[in-house]
Image (cartoon, helix red, strand yellow):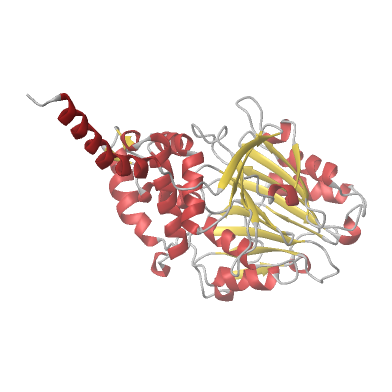
Amino acid sequence: MMSPRRTFLALLSLLFVLAPTRAFADKRRPVTGALTTEQGVRVLRLHGSAFDRGYSHGFLLGPDIRELATQVLLSPIVWPSLDYYENTVRKQIVPLFSFTLGQQRELDGILAGIRESVGPDKLHVDAVDRDLDVIDLKVMNIFADIQNGGCTSFAAWGPATRNGDTIVGRNLDFNRLPGIPESQLIIAYTDAGADRQPWITLAWPGMIGGYTALNASGVFVSMHDVRVPVNLPAAPFVPRALAIRRIMENTTAGDAIARATEILRDSHAFCGNNFLVATAFHDQATPAAVFEYDGQFARDGGVSVRTPEAQSNTLPPHTIACTNHYRLRADATACDRYAKVQQMLVDHPTGEIDLDLARQIEAKAAVNMTLHTVTADLNTGQLTVSFCTAEKNASETNPATFTLKDLLTPKN
């Protein structure tokens, strides 16, 4: 039998052996971001390296991302079967898309942050008997490329607006899948770098791209679906949410239209798209345009730029509108939402459009599937944001008012 003294010394030596291991285990990676709720809207602010931004994203929103992945990615409403998701989407469709090294690092960071937040045991997804992984996160970021919706946007500037600034309005319309409406938030990338502008996006947990986005220079981009045949030989494809991110990070109000053309011609598309790109108005000739782009390269290198002068309709001067049909790359088709925006713009004399009227225009075009509505003055950086509820579409809920400067100011 060991003496009391020897027992004490043995326990003491064991504590010295275990202490470094425990200290290491308790040392969590620093969180370079903050999650706040402001006027009822969740705002996730991120900064730092790609991995750090991802880790903070995953750590702060771990349960949300896991729940959203389970509710949406494994939903029988979305895919024909779980087997289709596991063997067609994950193994055949995801490899068609390219992610940059930085984007891959950010997704790796998100997964690491989720693991730290919920614990490794809760990464397991019983329905498919495996852990949540980076491929699932990639599916979340190409979801817009393989699931169609509808949206409405417009821009007005100069003589068309009350203060001469660029005013934009935007409805994002999409199926109200479980978890989608209530998990919407603003994600702000608050730090600039040699290769990027600070920017914000209205998105969902786990998203690293943009659907509705604005950058610090006063550039706005909104995504719209256009149903055209997929051009598979053009793979690898760039997820269109990440094409928007490239525009956000790499353009200013002075060069956005020209640079967006270059970026989209270099971003092979899996599906048909309309992107409305608008910029703060500084007397430039073209502060807004609609980019009609897809994988059909024989026409305009795959990207046709519809400026106000090129429109095949009679919108008032200094305005442009966009829904879910081409007007250059194909003959325009009838669209009730487009007609409503057009009529609202015609009905209001030059010089009336401000943020309040912009919201009225978007409300006129809203549908039951309108998940979020945004209006913004791109010169001042003031914007309003509203999200849908279970009972109301986004245009029917009270908007929160923000400034871009505040959203891009770190909170930690």
Q: Is residue 314 left or right of residue 369?
A: right
Q: Say which residue appears at 43% left-offset and 51% top-offset.
A: 109
| 135 relative to 258, above or below | above
Residue 197: where, in percent of width, then height? 64, 63
The quadrant of the picture occupied by the C terminus is: top right
Q: Say which residue appears at 73% left-offset and 62% top-offset.
A: 217
Asked whether residue 355 appears in the rendered view, the answer is yes
Among the 4 quarters of the image, the one containing residue 99: bottom left
Q: Say which residue appears at 72% left-offset and 35% top-offset.
A: 395
Q: Is residue 170 left or right of residue 271?
A: right
- Mark count: 0
**Of the pair 135 and 120, the residue shown nearer to us:** 120
| 239 relative to 55, above or below | below
| 127 relative to 404, above or below | above
Q: Say which residue appears at 31% left-offset and 50% top-offset.
A: 88
Residue 27: where, in percent of width, then height? 41, 44
Among the 4 quarters of the image, the one containing residue 392: top right
**Of the pair 318 and 20, the residue shown nearer to us:** 20
Q: Is residue 253 left or right of residue 165?
A: left
**Of the pair 24 and 272, the residue shown nearer to us:** 24
Residue 354: where, in percent of width, then height? 86, 48
